[in-house]
Amino acid sequence: MHISDFHLSYCSNIHPGESWEATFQNLQRYIPEIRSNLNFQQSFGIGLRLSHEASLELQKPSIIAEFKAWLESENAYVFTLNGFPYGDFHRTTVKDQVHFPDWTTEERRDYTIRSFRILAGLIPEGLDGGISTSPISYRHWFQSESDLNAAMVKASHHLLQVVEELALIERETGKFLHLDIEPEPDGILENSGEMIWLFQEYLLPIAKETWAKSRHLNEAEAEKLIKRHIQVCYDVCHFAIVYEKPSETFAKFASAGIQIGKIQISAALKLLLGDDKKLIKQKLEPFVESTYLHQVVGRYPTGKLVSYPDLPYA
């Protein structure tokens, strides 16, 4: 939905279903219902969650043609994809496997590029489009600084290959697309500082070294290209959990020349710890479940943060 200068979408990742058939059935069922409940008559924006399995189907010309015809009949449009969960995201134990395969793998790179090709075929003329993605990997999978650094280097090469593909798509189609990396607690990238670190310590130096020869770009040109096609998915819940104020975070990104391509409106629980810890535990226990991680970050009066990978640990 176009509101002021922004497009507000309904994200389909809340519905179970990994195949394109299941994904499409959910859209056909829920989008008209939501539009009716909102009494919204204008063109309706959809944030499409596309799994690896579904993307393999939707890339087929006949399937995407059918979907585009449905969008037109419903006066709806797709301008953003959720490309974070690669595989099963419902009715199974997801937990840290939501990051698998991560950005160190060719599978994550290829799935993302395929999804961008699909998005380029769906997005209306005149709009830019983004795909949100994993914050590189799950940090607890790496036991040493050398392992983490090796993962960052490998992931950065894959991200730069995506940038090259997005530049090619823009030359071929005129469609401007960007990859929106989504920091979250216990991801390798948790906060604004670590997002800036990705650019300054990995993406820009590696691009400077490799693109000078392969693409004949100087440092300024490489930086411009990277910051055009790699942006931030600002998830309200995730940044709140690490105690970042939006105004300060946006200012830091602006100062670093990093754009916010997507904002996810989400919520987190906040508790003030008093004397009755037993009562607090009783109130939290119903939220303990086996499907997803529920990361917890506590803050001492001194400002020091303490993190727990899941609610039971906290």
Image (tube, rainbow, N blue to C red):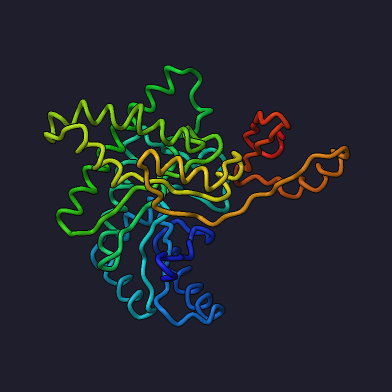
Left or right: 308 in relation to 155 = right
Picture quarter with the C terminus? top right
Q: Residue 254 occupies which quadrant of the picture?
A: top left
Residue at the location (46% across, 33% down)?
A: 194
Left or right: 291 in relation to 200 = right
Residue at the location (65% across, 44% down)?
A: 290
Q: Position of residue 192 (x, y in %)?
A: 48, 38
Picture quarter with the N terminus? bottom left
Residue at the location (39% across, 32% down)?
A: 198
Residue 126 or residue 310, whichever sits in front: 126
In the image, residue 200 sits, relative to residue 84, either above or below, namely: above
Q: Position of residue 45 (x, y in %)?
A: 41, 69
Q: How many marks?
A: 0
Left or right: 214 in relation to 302 = left
Q: Residue 288 occupies which quadrant of the picture?
A: top right
Residue 18 or residue 228, whichever sits in front: 228
Q: Position of residue 195 (x, y in %)?
A: 43, 36
Q: Position of residue 41 (x, y in %)?
A: 45, 82
Residue 51 or residue 216, whichever sits in front: 216
Residue at the location (46% across, 18% down)?
A: 145
Q: Residue 117 occupies which quadrant of the picture?
A: bottom left
